[in-house]
Amino acid sequence: MTISFYVNLIQIILSIALIVIILLQAKGSGLGSVFGGDSSIYKTRRGVEKTLFQATIGLALAFFAVSILSVLLAG
């Protein structure tokens, strides 16, 4: 197995983890906020919500880096 196989495997794992974390964040917001129901209330992130937000940013950056690495290895 080549290194590109492992890079692709890591990319798949990161994408699944990113989808799960994004869905966990969307679960708490409710459907009313999609249509502007909660737009007037400013809320700071605390606790688990802040950790999920930071994990989402970290996973997105890692996914971006692995995607660039995958393109470089393919070319």
Image (tube, rainbow, N blue to C red):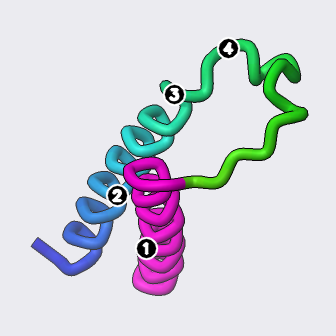
31 within the magenta span = no
Horizontal side, residue 35 vs residue 58: left or right? right
Q: Which residue is mark 4?
A: 31
Question: Are discs 3 and 4 less than 8 Å apart at CB?
Answer: no
Badge 1 crowding class, 10 Å Cα cut-off, few under 14, some 14 to 19, many 20 or more, is some
Q: CA distance from mark 2 to mark 1?
A: 8 Å
Q: Secondary structure at mark 2?
A: helix
At mark 1, the secondary structure is: helix
In percent of the image, x 22 and y 67: which residue is there?
5
- Mark 1 is on which residue type? Ala
**Contact (Cβ within 8 Å) of mark 2 with mark 3:** no
Mark in front: 2 vs 3: 3
Magenta residues span: 46-75
The kind of residue on which mark 2 rests is Leu
Look at discs 4 and 2 and give the one toward the viewer: 4
Mark 1 vs mark 4, CA separation in Å: 30 Å
Q: Amino acid at mark 3?
A: Gly
CA separation, marks 4 and 2? 27 Å
Q: Amino acid at mark 4?
A: Leu
User: Given contact means CB atoms under 8 Å apart, are the residues at marks 2 and 1 in contact?
Assistant: yes
Distance of label 3 from label 1 (alpha carbons)? 25 Å
Q: Which residue is mark 2?
A: 14
> Which dot marks residue 28?
3
Residue at screen point 20% across, 70% down: 6
Q: Residue furthest left?
A: 1
Q: Position of residue 65 (x, y in %)?
A: 48, 79
Quadrant hosting residue 37: top right
Q: Nearer the viewer, residue 27 or 19?
A: 27
